[in-house]
Image: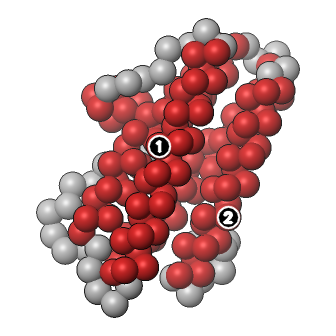
Amino acid sequence: MQKTNIDVKAILNKQVANHGVLYTKFHQHHWYVQGASFYTLHEKFEELFNSIAANSDEIAERLIAIGGAPYSTLAEYLEHASIEEKPYTKKTSANDMVASVVHDYRIIRDEISEGIELTGEAGDDSTQDMLIAYKTEIEKNIWMLQAFLDQSPLEGE
């Protein structure tokens, strides 16, 4: 079945929503991380929220370039995201924060994999190339965060 530009727009907009939620979660982890890994993770979470912001911008701009309208409000992000926000109501260990990030990255990675297939079916090579490059970045982040947790990249899949 031939996929349409509408399908491509939907997959990109889902990622705009996911990135809006994850951006906030990274800030939360950045602010609340404690313990022996504070300095390492405080800086890493800042690096990751900056990366999420840049990737979100690239995805949203691609969406506009193909005639879409990216979500741009917190309400839209929460309504359409696959990942969930989690209010910080009690102390969370650094390892639990990292595991949460891995979980969210895996959701995004899997959806981007679907997007790669969908954009191929739609003949949208430019969007497909963007998603392939981004999937590679996410897989690297998963590997590194899993290493921090003393786990193999695929453990917990």
Tell me if mark 2 has few (under 14), some (14-19) or many (20+) residues whose alpha carbon lies within 10 angstroms of its own: few
Q: Is residue 55 visible?
A: yes
**Nearest the camera: 34 or 85?**
34
Q: Residue at x 71, y 39 (%)?
A: 131
Asked whether the viewer can see residue 82, the reply is no
Circles 1 and 2: CB distance less than 8 Å? no
Report the side of 122 relative to 61 (left or right): right
**Image label count:** 2
Q: Which residue is mark 1?
A: 53
Q: Quadrant of the N terminus?
A: top right
Mark 1 Cα-neighbour bin, 10 Å: few <14, some 14–19, many ≥20: some
- 94 up-or-down from 63: above or below: below
Amino acid type for the residue under numbered disc 2: Lys
Q: Position of residue 95 (x, y in %)?
A: 40, 79
Location of residue 56 with respect to 120 vertically, above or below? below
- For the C terminus, give its image quadrant: bottom right
Residue that appears at 60% across and 66% down: 142
Q: Which residue is mark 2?
A: 140
Figure check: 85 above or below 41:
above
Residue 83 x/y as whole percent: 43, 46
Name the secondary structure under disc 2. helix
Q: Amino acid at mark 1?
A: Ala
- Residue furthest to the bottom in view is 36
- Residue 115 in the image, given as x and y percentages of width and height: 69, 34
7 left or right of 92 in image: right
Coordinates of residue 116 in the picture (x, y in percent): 75, 36
The residue at 56%/47% (across/down) is: 108
- As displayed, is residue 75 above or below residue 90? above
Q: Please, what secondary structure does the residue beneath circle 1 have?
A: helix
Frontmost of labels 1 and 2 is 1
Outermost residue on the top side: it is 67
Q: Quadrant of residue 111?
A: top right
